Amino acid sequence: CIITDPETHRVLDILPKRTAFTLNRYLRSFPKEERNNVELFVSDMWKPFQESASFYFPNATRIIDKYHWVRQMTWAFENVRKSEQRKFGKQYRIYFKHSRKLLLKHFDTLDEDTKRQVLIMLDTSVPLSRSHFYKEELQKILKTNEVFEKKEKFKRWIDYTENCGIIQFEKCTDTYRHWLTEILASMDTDITNGFTEGCNNKIKVLKRNAYGYRNFRRFRNRILHIFSHKQLNKDQAAA
């Protein structure tokens, strides 16, 4: 479990596990006065993270990182595509699989030739065509500049989609309703977990290059050492 400051791009600590017990024990080590000063808490959709934050950071606005809740919609659409392409012959299955990126892209950003390719694919399946419509509508909403308007459109999208009859999107809207407060809060700020996810990728590379670490303390120290040098270079540049 990696804990970072998304504003200053600092790795604050590395925990051996991301269980509620491990996280709660760590957060209890900080004085209550300091925890009360935390203003924003950003995480993925791992429930123990948000539950711990609600208890230990009572004054913080809790946010679900945009990448993690948007990909719920992406997964829903991808699951529909996979389900539909299984109904086709081998040649069409391979074609749909290779064309997945075209289907995922926002339709308005495609050129005329690729738009025609997408429309031909959508004509082969009603569920796929409808799912593509729901995906496109949400992508348009995410491009809305005015925050209040974006929130209202998002809530209307949930109302419109939750009984669409496509189980993958109904599950997606159920997830959105469960995390609605934290998702709407993510629209009020530009702060994301992008830095944290980047750190995760570098940690995976470190672990792979070392063929794994048997001692967590050494692993943790190695991670903190890598990112401390990065932060030192930033501080020197600022000075």
Image (cartoon, rainbow, N blue to C red):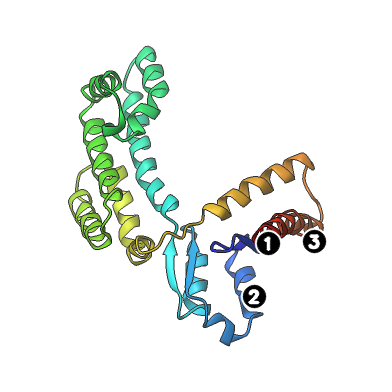
Q: Position of residue 234 (x, y in %)?
A: 66, 57
Q: Earlier in the sequence, mark 2 or mark 1?
A: 2
Tell us which disc is closer to us: 2 or 1: 1
Query: Can the viewer see residue 45?
Result: yes
Residue at which label 1 appears = 235
Badge 3 amino acid: Arg
Residue at image point 64% right, 80% down: 30
In what quadrant of the picture does the N terminus appear?
Answer: bottom right
Q: Position of residue 2 (x, y in %)?
A: 63, 60
Q: Nearer the viewer, residue 131 or 87?
A: 131
177 lies left or right of 38 = left
Seen from this angle, which residue lies furthest top?
A: 91
Query: Can the viewer see residue 18?
Result: no
90 lies left or right of 214 = left
Q: Nearer the viewer, residue 20 or 146?
A: 146
* Res 90 quadrant in image: top left
Badge 2 amino acid: Arg
Residue at which label 2 appears = 25
